[in-house]
Image (tube, grey):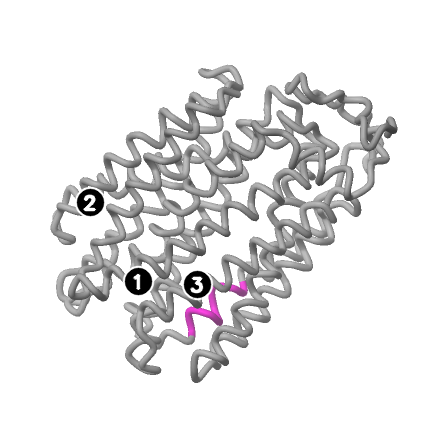
């Protein structure tokens, strides 16, 4: 979408603040879907949900490509957000079924690395469509998503929901929050066996845990920073002179930094900080804030912008592995899908709010697209503050 915004604005006359609300519509439909599908992942397993979501998302992207006004763009875009929401939390449940507490930081780091590499693919393929093939914005929603279709099919053929499906013993559950009994949960005066909890009991176990709720708030600000960068950095570098300066290719430094930051952050979380997640959150989000404020003052064609943008993405996204590992750490494996889903709901609720704000600030500041960077910097600092309060 970030690379399509200038084309949509030019062809259909839709302003940046309106497009910001279109972005928000996807993020919020994704958020609602996460709150629903995370719990369904706990109940039914992630294998089929991830694959179905990928196939549906590919189809809805194609529908978006034929849009002629805001209505015909936003309706399939909302549906696309829900289809996308079928993947992350159910997929995270699959991972927590296969790997234990001391490996989760690295495992979620690799999970995030894959997500970061998908952004690299999206950025590079979009630039090839616009710059090399000289096609219009509509083809951005037609060609790159075919890779997702293939990935969804392969996932279903290869992945299994848990070790038992292949004849292995299941992992022992090991929540490290001492307010939760890993075997039983007291609900309404009754003792319910942990493995046969109802959906309502899983939701209530998460929503009554104050440390988990703090983590949800923290990832909300972190995701505001992440998606502020992902959607608006391409707009910043796709100025009117981008074909002459070549500055558009600088934007690729962002998703590359995010991908490498994710896998590095996961390793540091487990090995250096010994699975104490808040330390990674604070130590990564503070330099992300510094890098973002630095980008605001740099000319967009300055060579050092490549380095600073790389580290902005590296640190802003690298902390997410700690957030996702917090869900099974605090709530236990059997509630991990529900926990990840609730966390992602908060993440995309906040991320949705920041995009119209950025679009509006760009307009009122004489189309100064660099306004994205101070907003991202503030979001990073708020994440640091909350990370200090989590202490988990």
Q: Position of residue 367 (x, y in %)?
A: 19, 65
Q: Which residue is mark 1?
A: 359
State the CA–CA distance, disc 3 to disc 1: 10 Å
Query: Which secondary structure type mostly characterizes the magenta part of the structure?
Result: helix
Q: Is residue 279 magenta?
A: no
Return the disc, 3 or 2, that comes first in the chain's sequence.
3
Check disc 1 and report its element: helix, strand or loop. Answer: helix
Closer mark to the observer between disc 3 and disc 2: 3
Residue 99 visible in image: yes
Q: Which residue is mark 2?
A: 295
User: Mark 2 Cα within 10 Å, few/some/many (few <14, many 20+)?
Assistant: many
User: Mark 3 Cα within 10 Å, few/some/many (few <14, many 20+)?
Assistant: many
Q: Which residue is mark 3?
A: 23
State the CA–CA distance, disc 1 to disc 2: 18 Å
Q: Position of residue 391 (x, y in %)?
A: 49, 20
Of 266 and 204, the residue lying toward us: 204
Return the disc, 1 or 2, that comes first in the chain's sequence.
2
Q: Position of residue 69 (x, y in %)?
A: 43, 82
Of 255 and 186, the residue lying toward us: 186
User: Mark 1 Cα within 10 Å, few/some/many (few <14, many 20+)?
Assistant: many
The single residue placed furthest to the bottom in the displayed view is 68
Give the residue displayed 38% in from the left and 53% down from the top.
Answer: 354
Q: Is residue 55 left or right of residue 243?
A: right
Give the residue displayed 42% in from the left and 55% down from the top.
Answer: 353
Residue 296 vs 273, above or below: the answer is below
Residue 361 vs 107, above or below: the answer is below
Give the residue displayed 45% in from the left and 16% down from the top.
Answer: 272
Stretch of the chain drawn in magenta: 139-146
Q: Is residue 143 magenta?
A: yes
Q: Is residue 312 left or right of residue 76?
A: left
């Amino acid at each position: 979408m970030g690379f399509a915004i200038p084309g949509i604005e030019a062809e259909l006359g839709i302003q940046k603040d309106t497009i910001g609300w279109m972005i928000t519509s996807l993020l919020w439909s994704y958020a609602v879907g996460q709150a629903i599908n995370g719990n369904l992942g706990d109940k039914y397993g992630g294998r089929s949900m991830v694959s179905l979501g990928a196939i549906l998302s590919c189809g809805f992207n194609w529908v978006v490509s034929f849009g002629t006004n805001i209505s015909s763009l936003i309706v399939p875009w909302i549906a696309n957000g829900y289809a996308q929401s079928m993947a992350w939390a159910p997929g995270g449940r699959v991972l927590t079924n296969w790997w234990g507490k001391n490996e989760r930081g690295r495992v979620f780091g690799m999970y995030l690395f894959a997500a970061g590499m998908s952004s690299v693919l999206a950025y590079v393929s979009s630039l090839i469509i616009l710059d090399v093939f000289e096609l219009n914005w509509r083809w951005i929603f037609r060609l790159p998503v075919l890779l997702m279709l293939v990935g969804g099919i392969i996932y279903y053929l290869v992945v299994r929901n848990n070790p038992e499906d292949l004849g292995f013993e299941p992992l022992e559950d090991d929540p490290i929050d001492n307010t939760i009994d890993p075997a039983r949960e007291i609900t309404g005066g009754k003792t319910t066996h942990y493995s046969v909890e109802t959906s309502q009991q899983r939701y209530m176990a998460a929503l009554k845990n104050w440390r988990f709720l703090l983590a949800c708030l923290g990832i909300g600000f972190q995701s505001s920073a992440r998606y502020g960068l992902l959607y608006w950095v391409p707009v910043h570098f796709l100025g009117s002179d981008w074909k002459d300066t070549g500055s558009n290719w600088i934007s690729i430094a962002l998703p590359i930094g995010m991908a490498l930051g994710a896998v590095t952050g996961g390793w540091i979380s487990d090995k250096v900080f010994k699975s104490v997640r808040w330390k990674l959150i604070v130590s990564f989000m503070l330099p992300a804030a510094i890098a973002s404020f630095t980008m605001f003052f740099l000319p967009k064609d300055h060579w050092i912008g490549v380095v600073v943008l790389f580290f902005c993405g590296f640190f802003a996204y690298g902390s997410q592995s700690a957030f996702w590992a917090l869900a099974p750490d605090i709530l236990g494996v059997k509630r991990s899908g529900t926990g990840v889903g609730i966390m992602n709901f908060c993440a995309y609720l906040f991320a949705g709010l920041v995009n119209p704000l950025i679009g509006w600030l760009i307009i009122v500041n004489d189309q100064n697209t660099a306004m994205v960077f101070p907003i991202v910097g503030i979001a990073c600092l708020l994440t640091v503050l909350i990370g200090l309060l989590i202490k988990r």
